[in-house]
Structure formats: structure tokens, C-alpha cells
Amino acid sequence: MQKLTLFFVLFFCSLISDRIIAKDSNPPGRVPDEVESDGGHTLGFSYGGVAAVSGQGSVRANPAMLVFEKKYEVSAGYNWPSVGREFFQAGVIDSQTASFAAGFQYTSFRERFKDPNQLSDRDEKYQAFYDSPVKNRLSFALAQAFSKFSVGLGAQVVNSANDTDNKRGVTLGGGLAGLLTPKLRFGLSAENLANRGVKNIAPSVYRGGIAYMMFDGDLTLHLDYRQRERVLAERLSFETGTVLENKTYSPFEKMGIISSSVRIQDLLRLLAGYGLEIGGGRSTLSGGVALVNKNFSFSYLIGKPYMKQSSLHQAVNLEIQLAF
């Protein structure tokens, strides 16, 4: 266990280094951080953990996971994205007062969205160009447990932050989770289905993964596959504002993600995750620390969503969760 602890400490320290990998000083388009942010501890797992995260992040990542812990939980988190406006997320989960579980999450921003075409400063324009074009996002989830598995349903209401666009859309989702063995759990989910008209702010996402628990949960290992519909920002050039003609993209980004967590002294938990685009050039690295007990969780999570791009710093999340 001491060797595992040392590994996680070194892994987390590498996140705050700007020289862990060769950089691209002229990055292509990218997806806004908020579009991918599921909340909870998912950032610490590089947005993986579809079979591991049962807290606030499961409202979007996999609604079926809501039933795996009986609790009434409120949470609040503040996010400093690598690019764009700071945003906060707040939510409630109730899996103990009824035979089914329910969850809600609200995402909004501290500042108004800025039109990059009206900005002259290059740094401000870059921040606005790849900012999330969202005003607010409301996510809902319901889950029901059966003998050997659970099923969840999700919905999302998303509002555009562009005053000239004024788009509002409702999308659907769902998930499945269960135990293959007492220590091995699986999870499957789909998010933002039927998203025609709002796919650039609510892209469809398909997830599948497994989680293996050892030493009574002191050590967990997770393997995930995530397929996300690409958004327009990934195809746009910041320099010209037009679609990148010399860059070919598949309709979906396909990521393989490996992540893990280790508990130390019954209170401290370390998280880490690494993601690699299959057949592409994107890689992600993340980690975090969390103080956790039965009724309380306080976490600090950090990640590099584009490891090869020197102009993109870390995305940071600070979150508190209270269970009753």
C-alpha cells in the first residue's frame, strides 16, 4: 500500500508541471471544458468512472449508479476551466427516502458570455472563442435497482449563452449498471440523445466501463471507453474563425481511459486518471485528493485536458458534498 501511495503522489505532482510532455504552441480547435464536465469526482478520473462514480457525477455520467449508495446528498463545486469562464455546479441526490433514486444538477457561470468577434485583446478573444456557449444547464436523473442490476433514465435542459442564437434544447439519456462479481462492477450509459439543434452545446456521449474493487474498496481500478460527438469548436481555427480545411475529424472522438483511487487512513482518498484518444492525438491527465467519510466529502481535482497544448493550463475543480 505504501508503494501505491507513493505512485499516486508522484502522479498527482506531475500534473502541475508544464514540462511533462512535448507541447504544441499553435493548437487546433478544442471542446470547451464545461461541455465535458460531469461534476463530482469525474474530473479526477479524466471524465471516466462510468462504473465507479455514484455521487453527483453519476447524474450525467451514468444515472444507474445513483442507487449504489443509500443517502441524501447535497453538493456544490466551483470550476476553473483551462479555457473560458469559471462556472459552478450544484446538485441534490436522494436514494434513501423512496424505492427509487433521483438526482438533479444545475450548472451556470459567474460571468456573461462574451462574443469573441467584439474583443480586440488576443488573450481575451482566445478565452472567449473556445468558451462554452452555454448560459445554464439542468440535468435530471432517476434510477431503479433490481436484483442484480440497476437502470437509470436522464434528461437535460440546456440554454445557449449566445443572445443572437437563443437556443434551448431538451435531451435524453440513460444508463445500466450491475455487479459481475462481488468485486467487479460494470456500467453503460448514453447522454444527450435526441439532441438535434443543440449538439454543439450538448453532444451525444456513449460510455462503457468496468470498476474493480480491492481491499474492501481501499483500492479501485477503472477502465472506460467513451465516444463523444464532436462539437463545432473542435473544427474551428482561432486565427481565422473558419473550419479547419486541412484537419480531418471523425464524427466522434473515441477515448480510452484508465483511472484509479486509493484510500489512506480511512479518510484521505487519492484519485488519478489518464485518457488517450483512439486513432487521434489527444491525451488527458488528471488527479486529485479528497477527504471522505460516510457523511462528508471535500475534494480538490486538477487535470490537463490537452496535454500537448502549451497554451492550455490545468482545469481545476473544488467541491464539497454533504450526505444526510
Image: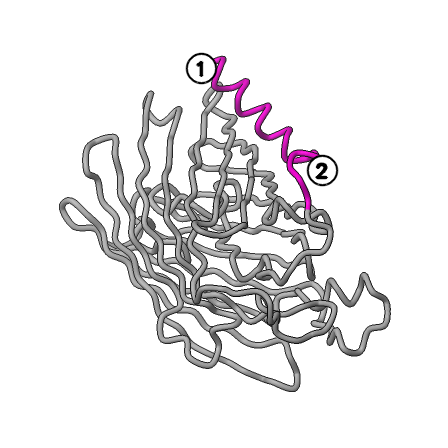
Label 1 Cα crowd, 10 Å radius (few <14 / some 14-19 / many 20+): few
Main structural element of the magenta stretch: helix, strand or loop?
Answer: helix
Determine whether the residue tagged by mark 2 lies in a helix, strand or loop. loop
Q: Amino acid at mark 2?
A: Asp
Vertical relation: 133 (above or below) 106: below
| Residue located farthest toward the front when viewing the structure as drawn | 246
Query: Residue 118, position in %: x, y?
Result: 80, 78
Chosen colour scheme: one colour
Query: Residue 244, position in %: x, y?
Result: 61, 70
In reply to whether residue 184 is colored magenta, the answer given is: no
The residue drawn where x is 51% and y is 34% is 272
The residue drawn where x is 50% and y is 64% is 249
Determine whether the residue tagged by mark 1 lies in a helix, strand or loop. loop
Q: Image check: 179 left or right of 215?
A: left
Quarter of the image where one finds residue 1: top left
Q: What are the residue bounds of the magenta stretch?
A: 1-23
Residue beneath label 1, please? 1
Gap between marks 1 and 2, in whole Å?
Answer: 29 Å
Q: Amino acid at mark 1?
A: Met
First in sequence: mark 1 or mark 2? 1
In the drawing, what numbered circle is on residue 18? 2
